[in-house]
Image (cartoon, grey):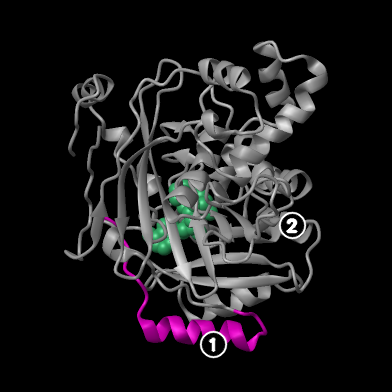
Amino acid sequence: MATTLDIARDNPNAQTVIASAPGMGEEKPTLIGLSREELGEALGSIGVPQKQWRMRASQLWHWLYVRGLSDFSQMTNIGKDLRQKLDDAFSISRPEIVSEQISVDGTRKWLFRFPPRGAGHPVEVETVYIPEEGRGTLCVSSQVGCTLTCTFCHTGTQKLVRNLTSEEILSQILIARDRLGDFPDADTPQGAIVPSEGRLVTNIVMMGMGEPLYNFENVKKALLIASDGDGLSLSKRRITLSTSGVVPEIYRTGDEIGCMLAISLHAVRDDDRDILVPINKKWNIEALLEACRNYPGLSNAKRITFEYVMLKDINDSNEDALELVRLLKGIPAKINLIPFNPWPGSQYACSDWERIEEFADIVNRAGYASPIRTPRGRDIFAACGQLKSASERMRKKDRDALTAGKTAVY
Ligand code: SAH
Ligand code: SF4
């Protein structure tokens, strides 16, 4: 079955590739996203003796995360009988790709559909790949929708449908690597050291749909698997988690995940931030910056990124820039200025280019690197803050059509 959701807007040349998809209704439990211990227990449940758990879990780990297999039959160092048993009991298949769009600038956006969890219905999630000189960044979603309602963010207009599981978070990385041809091919000898140079997905940013720190456990599990040196092996220095400011979980992120941190600051005074990023009413700027000051391991080489969306006449004055510099004093920081990306119905405009440059100059003069984030993939609606899936809007009729395996076109 293949369905399409083609939301290419401004660019009629944006390519939409429709990939074939596995069938719906896959109900076997997955092995993707389990810790090694959980993998061992899963093996136990199909009769593998406990003394083999560690060894078998390592074999699976290698096939799943180094080789990116989505089919047990190719796991050549596991006997045929056990492969069959694994296949009968578990799934390692990828989620359905509803659509893949490729922007004129090379940015890709996928819409994935994940099966229902419990009594729910299938959900759709967007993931974006941004190729750059010498690196490629995958922007991963943590939730379908968001409980927060930042007024400039399209995802914020979509109610939270549900948290993604660790499997669903990891699957976004696995499937992007599949589609980009970023896993070693089947001819690579088993046990060969697979070089990390030349990889297409070099960086992960948790900046897709949702607030990752309101789905802490699943995000943590997925990121620890993504950074495991015997698996996907992405350095924690190349994994950045962006939060609107869930202060207690910032402390836990430092202690329990240890990845890089980005903060959606966007305003320098509480009354403004209360409106733009309403979680500020719960944890204000002072509490947020205190958590940042205490983030483990900060240095000039390991800085916190402060994201600041440039909204015309709202937060873009010279006074705002000076206040930003004052607030961040003493915190090893990078400031990422993001030109506002509009979406249908948004109430803001992007600051003029000269304004953004003047703002950046003030910040630069104070000694901060302040790159202006180039909007990528605007023609396929893939830029920061533009992601919003149709899940919330799915009506019963469409859900029934999906469950029955029919094509639904939005
Ligand atoms: N929920 C997390 C991560 C997802 S948003 C967070 O808020 O940090 C990723 C980044 O895009 C955030 O900095 C967010 O504030 C920013 N963003 C949201 N909407 C935007 C828009 N319309 N234009 C530009 N940036 C936007
Ligand atoms: Fe949620 Fe982040 Fe968007 Fe705010 S900016 S609504 S926290 S996704």
In the foreground, 287 or 144: 144
Mark 1 or 2, closer to the camera: 1
The secondary element bearing badge 1 is classed as helix
The picture places residue 394, in percent across and down from the top left corner, at 26, 31
Q: Which residues are magenta?
A: 344-369
Residue at (58% x, 35% y) in the render: 166
Circle nearer the N terminus (1, 2):
2
Q: Where residue 256 sits in the image (x, y, percent)?
A: 76, 43
Location of the C terminus (image quadrant): top left
Q: Nearer the viewer, residue 143 or 148?
A: 143
At label 2, counting other C-alpha atoms closer than 10 Å, the crowd grade (few under 14, some 14-19, many 20 or more) is: few
Q: Spatial distance from mark 1 to mark 2, Cα to Cα?
A: 26 Å
Magenta highlight on residue 213: no
Q: Amino acid type of disc 1?
A: Asp
Residue ID for mark 1: 361
Q: Kindly identify the residue that appears in the image at 62 percent across and 53 percent down.
A: 284
> Does 347 appear in magenta?
yes
Q: Residue 87, relative to residue 142: is it above or below?
A: above
* Residue 146 numbered tag: none
Residue 369 in sight here = yes
Q: Nearer the viewer, residue 373 or 95?
A: 95
Name the spot of residue 406 as percent of width and height, x first: 20, 26
